Amino acid sequence: MNEKIIQLKQELSKAVIGQETMIEGLLIGLLSDGHILIEGVPGLAKTTTINALAKALGLDFKRIQFTPDLLPSDIIGAQIYNPQDHSFSIKKGPLFTNLLLADEINRAPAKVQSALLEVMQERQVTIADETFKIDSPFLVMATQNPIEQEGVYALPEAQLDRFMMKLVVKHNSEEEELEIMRKGAAKSFKEVEKVLSIEELHSLQNELEKIHIDKELEQYIIQLISATRDPAKFGLANITQNIMFGVSPRASIDLYKAAKAKAFLRGNTFVTPADIGYVIHDVFRHRIVLSYEARAKGINADEIISKIVETLAIP
Amino acid sequence: MKHNLGKMIRLFIALSFILLSAEDFTYDFHLDKRNPYLKEPVILTLDLKQSNHDVVLLFNFDLQKSEDYFFQRLDTKETDTHHNTQIHYVYLIYPLKSGDINITFDLIKKITTDESVAYSFSGDRDNVKGLVTIDTKITLPPLPLKVKKLPENTALVGDFRLIHKFKTDQAEAYEPIPFEVKIEGSGYPPLLDNILPKDVKFTVFKENPIVNSIHNIQGTKSSVLYPMALSNNRSFNLDQIDIKAFNPKTMKSYILTVPKQHFNISKADVNTLVDKIDNPKPLESDWSWQTTILTTLLSYLVVFAAGYLTAISVKWKKKTLAQKDDPFKKKIESCKDERSLLQVLMAADSKRFTKNIEILEDGLYGDGKINFKRVKQEILEKL
């Protein structure tokens, strides 16, 4: 594994115990310019992790708590009138940052969620008639709480599609919990120091470009994507009625990039089918639109993805 | 000299007020007899009349309670009020002790003003305004009575008659025979502790006597009913009962009599006497309860053991079936080569089988040689 990545992981482990899935996902997102949606109950060190990542990279970090009364201007900024010189000036919102934690994103209404669309995809913000480029790197880590379903606004498919991966964060193991308890009580969590500069991060991103992916694997990715859209064609007629819509073209791009990033994080110079297997659930799970029948039967997207992986022969 | 004269004038004015206040009213007692017999009714009348008409006068009067006499207020008449209060009280008194006794009184004189009375009247149910009075306790001299003794063994005083009633004089053994004695007339209420002698040879069931008394100026009209029931297992006699009474008006003694009565008691069928509803069965030395308890306990144990074993067997069966039918385990077992095994692991929780995946990758895409069966076994052991 790359030395810088090892250093980064070690630095993050000073502030975060366990939660390797979340850290790995964030690093994949960071290296491949993707955004991460995290689903998990409160108190799983989501803020701590992204904060630690910002410190370790020396990046700017902002957190927005999404609430039902939040307005788009609260996050993107607004044009403010100055009565002294009778002019308007732009007040930039908290979106102007490198790492953004959108906490409980499904608590805000659709218009606020949509305000994130432009910035997530185009990396630019338009306030009044002025468009601002967002500095690179820019990573949105959004969270949503799965236990509360009342008073929340489900994220629109278009927005969900803009997240590279949806991670399901679970509670720590008992050993990790014990360590958290001891360190938390003794306040012995160490300060995270900057171990990676933006230039070094960009160079890591460039290295990622060099990761080789075989044509057969590219074909394999396309087959996986197609299997979600037309399962019967791949001998998966039994899951056809469970899928309303398959994954979008963004999914193929993101799966391709995520698999390369995973291979890079594992210290490989080429992608193997296992790399795809490691990330496919995270890339697909929020993009497959389940049918009414599937929901009624209690079938989730992960089960469908597993079925597809199981059926399609690996190269 | 001037000062001494002033003091004398002030003292005279003060003394005049005390004398006047002491003479705010007059009273007049009247007893219809001073030398009554024990328990003979005596009528006491008292007239209170206000003499100082400058004040508003009220009275609180009653006889003091005493063991020497019993009294009952018969009447109170207020013929005038406020500045000319006139009250007439009538009491009925029964001396309860022979010899010299004193009738004593409680009297409180209450002085107030017209304004106070008007103020108290201005109140209503929800806004009660008290009447402010200046109260003075007046000590009235006691009225002495010389109470005469009654003839010996006198139980009742007055003019009474006795009525008795048996429901029947034939009964079965232990069957209760209702019996009533009623004494009525005028005089001191004819309450007796025991109508029947104490040493009778049959069972007597008694209820509290039912007393009806009306006090009036002639004395007290009373009617006392003694309900009883007699019972025995053989024939018996109720001896004659004589109750000695004395009439103070005629000053003569007389006897109230319940004549001798014979009751024929026939033998009762024992079976009819047994209370088949409430009477419990006699206790017997029965040890069957121990057997019952042991049987019950044993049955509980058997049921418990059966339930426990069933629960364990269900759990064990479920576990065995789950192990047997675990689809993932079946899939792993059915994998025939590294590729298919890698595929199954990728589809499942890849992160859980990271090491196994790496080994399989090495075998498939690297230079390493792997023992497929061993890898498979390792995965199966993890499940």
Image (cartoon, rainbow, N blue to C red):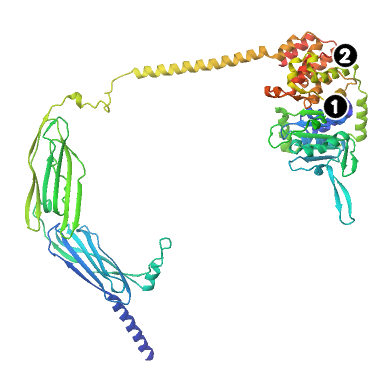
Q: Are marks 2 and 1 on the same chain?
A: no
Which chain contains the residue that carries disc 2? B
Image quadrant assignment for residue B73? bottom left
**Pointer 1 residue:** A250
Q: CA distance from mark 2 to mark 1?
A: 31 Å
Q: Quadrant of the N terminus of chain B?
A: bottom left
Image quadrant assignment for residue B252? bottom left
In the picture, measured across the screen, residue A307 lies left or right of residue B69, that is right
**Pointer 2 residue:** B366
Task: Pick the residue in front: A279 or B8.
Answer: A279
Which chain contains the residue that carries disc 1? A
Residue at image point 27% right, 23% down: B281
The answer to whether residue B343 is visible is no
In the picture, measured across the screen, residue A165 lies left or right of residue B185, that is right
Residue at image point 78% right, 8% down: B336
Q: Is residue B185 above or below residue A293?
A: below
Q: Amino acid at mark 1?
A: Arg
Residue at image point 38% right, 69% down: B132
SS under mark 2: loop
Q: Residues within 10 Å of mark 1 (few under 14, many from 20)?
A: some
Task: Pick the residue in front: B185 or A15.
Answer: B185
Q: Amino acid at mark 2?
A: Gly
